Image (cartoon, rainbow, N blue to C red):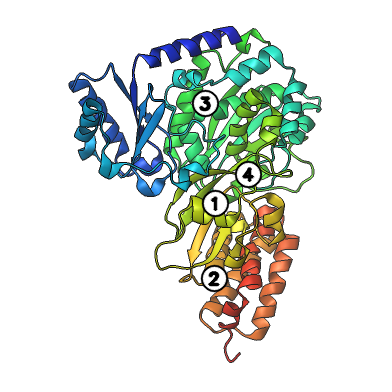
Amino acid sequence: MLDSLEDLKKLAQEKRDLKRNSHEELRVCVGSGCCSLGSEELLKDLKKEIKDNGLDERCKVKGVGCNGLCSEAIMVSHYHKVKDSASIYSKISASDSNSFIETLNKQTPIKKKKCDVTQSFFTRQKKIVLENAGIVDPDDIDDYIAYDGYLGLYTALEDMSPQDVINEIKISGLRGRGGGGYPTGLKWETVSKVDAQQKYIICNGDEGDPGAFMDRAIMEADPHKIIEGMALAGYACGATKGFIYVRAEYPIAVQKLNKAIKQARKKGILGNQIADSGFSFDIEVRLGGGAFVCGEATALVASIEGNRGNPRQKPPHLSDYGLWKSPTVLNNVETFANITPIIRNGGEWFKSIGTEKSPGTKVFALTGHIKNTGLVEVPMGITLRELIYDVGGGLNEGKKLKAIQTGGPSGGCIPEELLDIPVDYESLKSIGSIMGSGGLIVMDDSSNMVEVARFFMEFCQSESCGKCVPCRVGTSELTNLLDKFIKKDATKSDFELLKNMCEVVQDTSLCGLGQTAPNPVLSTIKYFEEEYLEGIKDA
């Protein structure tokens, strides 16, 4: 049991000393992408080969979270403690196990498989949320503690008041990373001031945007970081219970989270009287059925309560009337993953990264017609052009960029001529898109933008809960209208109707799903109007 900050520091040092006995580490990605290619089998084979060759005392083999460069999976890194550096190898398979034995014996790299770590994909990133991804074993709480895990929580419990924690988050300027960008410190402070016997902390891991996998990768790579962030929120707001709401389609994330919670309870990091501080906090994982609408706060709360995941009118807001009618803080996975680094390093440190109004970093899932598909974390303020061409490696040879789509079904399509705009909340909103949770889909000149708009509209139609008429009927009618343009059977009056109906659905829908569903249509009309006009017969 870890009963004090001193106990935690002592354990962390013991684990660091123990790790020094192994001069090298082989870190195998066991995230969903690499697992689908057989990385778990590779991990077992490497452990067996290392042991059979008598190298297990010198080299430790462990599973780690996503390294980011998913287009080069399976990824394995070879870390040298003496050199304090790592070689990264890509497109590894079980047949390469013997090559690693040779590498360990001769200290020579596998040249054909070695990844260039000086490329912009790695050098342009600034890792805060993903600082442990690819390094820490998500199944081993001691490994997390060895990398300063739970130091922020125990420091806060020993040296900071709840208001001190809130003040540090407010100083940092951290905004919610789920898409809305609401100031996190202000949200926490609002709940902390409510006088109530019971308060709740909810982590939204119900990631449903097409092309998005940021939260899944974070949960799989660093579950203890999310637990620590939620515990800090509980301490700051006066909550004693937390829930992590995860879609059932994320089995690896669910398994990692449940295991991490059990480990934290065993060490006294979750439960009653944490670190003899008088603060008690525990967490449960709740599974969602995959409904996109349950990403909306009130629908998510209804689902946790055991009801159908329908949104309700606001106000009252969750800060007053949340889970089981109690004050509730709801943030997404990436937001909670930022909390611990802020408490460890200070709000001013975080604020110095990014832009004045959008401090810190943002995690993006790069997908579509781009070379470096995968997960990246970059400072706010980087331009879209830098993100796509420097970090993402550009498009495949011979292809020209046509548009990028940010913000998922709620976002917009951005043309090539606007790529020099900085990535921050205000700038993206000014051109008809949103930050969203971090999905970024790159489309080349073979893409039909009306078909793209229809894809997202059909998605919103199928995911609508049906509670309000504008969303239930409006998304269906908009899908039908877009079909007419694709079939080149639309009329000029259909074009006017399409624009007017988008405005009606935006202005009258009950929740964010319906209110933002027209965004892809409106943005493609704004920047690619000629493709709609081509769908008008006898135009």
Residue 223: mark: none
Whichever of labels 3 and 4 marks the residue nearer the N terminus, that label is 4
Q: Position of residue 171 (x, y in %)?
A: 75, 32
Q: Position of residue 504 (x, y in %)?
A: 73, 67
Whichever of labels 4 and 1 marks the residue nearer the N terminus, that label is 4
Q: Is residue 294 left or right of residue 427?
A: left
**Above or below, 324 relative to 140:** below
Q: Residue at x 47, y 46 (%)?
A: 121
Mark 3, residue position: 224
* Secondary structure under the numbered disc 3 in the rendered image: helix
Mark 2, residue position: 449
Mark 4, residue position: 178
Mark 1, residue position: 439
Q: Spatial distance from mark 3 to mark 1, Cα to Cα?
A: 24 Å
Q: Position of residue 465 (x, y in %)?
A: 61, 54
Q: Nearer the viewer, residue 13 or 340?
A: 13
Residue type (three-letter) at the residue carrying disc 3: His
Q: Is residue 197 left or right of residue 125?
A: right
**Label 4 close to label 1 by CB (< 8 Å):** no
Q: Residue at x 56, y 57 (%)?
A: 385
Q: Quadrant of residue 163?
A: top right
Q: Spatial distance from mark 4 to mark 2, Cα to Cα?
A: 26 Å
Q: Spatial distance from mark 3 to mark 2, Cα to Cα?
A: 41 Å
Q: Spatial distance from mark 4 to mark 1, Cα to Cα?
A: 11 Å
Q: Spatial distance from mark 1 to mark 2, Cα to Cα?
A: 18 Å
Whichever of labels 1 and 2 marks the residue nearer the N terminus, that label is 1
Q: Is residue 149 left or right of residue 240?
A: left
Q: Position of residue 39 (x, y in %)?
A: 31, 38
**Above or below, 70 relative to 533:** above
Q: Spatial distance from mark 3 to mark 4, Cα to Cα?
A: 19 Å
Residue type (three-letter) at the residue carrying disc 4: Gly
* Secondary structure under the numbered disc 2 in the rendered image: helix
